[in-house]
Amino acid sequence: MDFSGPDAIDKAIRSGLDLDGTPIPLEMLSLYREVMEKEGARKRSGVKKSMRNRIVRSGAKHFDKDILNQRLIDAGWEGLKSKEVDFFFG
């Protein structure tokens, strides 16, 4: 099975396999599914806020903090918060 692209993790979880092909323990899958079910039922606060959160989480892996901060601002969001800098770049 091809585990590449943005939905690779979701595909692997649905198949019950880690990216290296080893089985994911049933207890881990069960807890994950339970939490995701609860998360799926949670009321959302807004698309733009969720988009920003995803950009910060993933962008921190691909950009240094100054570039990510400026890109957020240029796109119309607020720049990185100090807690985000500490968590992702500290």
Image (cartoon, rainbow, N blue to C red):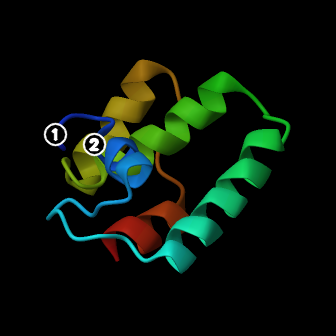
In the image, residue 7 sits, relative to residue 27, either above or below, namely above
In the image, residue 48 sits, relative to residue 31, either above or below, namely above
Quarter holding the N terminus is top left
Q: Is mark 2 on a helix, strand or loop?
A: helix
Q: Distance between the residues labelled 1 and 2?
A: 5 Å
Which residue is disc 1 drawn over?
A: 4
What residue type is disc 1 on?
Ser
Front residue of this view, candidates 48 and 71:
48
What residue type is disc 2 on?
Ala
Where in the figure is residue 54, as x and y percent of width and height?
47, 41
Front residue of this view, candidates 81 and 34:
34
Task: Check disc 2: other Cα within 10 Å, few if <14, some if 14-19, many if 20+.
Answer: some
Where in the figure is residue 44, as x and y percent of width and height?
79, 34
In screen coordinates, is 10 left or right of 65? right
Front residue of this view, candidates 63 and 66:
63
Quarter holding the C terminus is bottom left
